[in-house]
Amino acid sequence: MIISHKTKAIFVHIQRTAGTSIELALRREDGSITGDSYQGRIHLTAQELRAVVGPQTWDGYYRFAFVRNPWDRLVSWYFMCVQAPSPNRFQRYVVDNAPTFTDFVTKTTTGMGEKTTRNQLDFVTGPDGNLIVDFVGRYERLADDFAIVRKRLGLAHDLPRANASAHVNYRDCYTEETREIVAQRFARDVRYFGYQF
């Protein structure tokens, strides 16, 4: 999450959706941004952020997030974990409990792995299921959608590339079983955002 008072923006950072790059772009514009976490958490939902900043700031700021195809997102997440040069607790958990991508999809769904089962829609909606952010960009059209944010906030810099994982085409990582598991687990994201395998 990033709260920029200079640009009057709140960025809801969903895992593996180019969030680190977006945070860097906001920091380049607003040097007063000091942190990216709240009580040790980086990935707060819009509802949680609204409670943190209060209604006046929330209502007066431009709130945005980016989402990603769930099948592609999980592949990126897995490879980020196994390629991390200095793994954090979650990345070590994945390496210790999911030696393969199939294990990541099927076995790391509780405890620390539970975060990989949360629909992205939960990050951008209120208790009634309606959007509470102003804009939801797509990773799949990152340059074009970030250009919308950039124009709205008056950002001077292009989006840098950061925290990218190296992997093959996500479709090559799935079996019929794991493809269907992801379809069921993220059915709300698939339906709402119109994603397909």
Image (spheres, grey):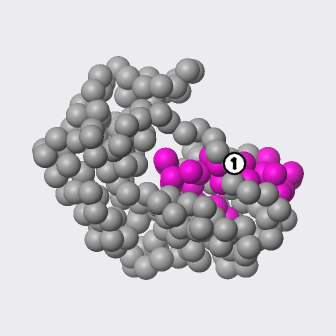
Residue 32 lies in the magenta stretch: yes
Residue 69 location, x and y as percent?
38, 57
**Within the image, what quadrant is residue 189 found in?**
bottom left
Q: Give the camera-side residue of 10 and 155.
A: 155
Q: Give the camera-side residue of 75 and 116.
A: 75
The residue tagged 1 is: 160
Task: Please give the count of numbered marks on the rendered protein.
Answer: 1
Task: Tell whether 34 sits left or right of 10.
Answer: right
Task: Tell whether 64 sits left or right of 187.
Answer: right
Q: At 20% across and 49% down in the image, what residue appears?
A: 179
Residue 47 location, x and y as percent?
52, 66
Q: At 23% across and 34% down in the image, what residue appears?
A: 102
* Residues rendered magenta in the picture: 9-34
**Secondary structure of residue under mark 1:** loop
Q: Quadrant of the C terminus?
A: bottom left
Task: Tell whether 106 sits left or right of 13.
Answer: left
Task: Tell whether 104 sits left or right of 87.
Answer: left
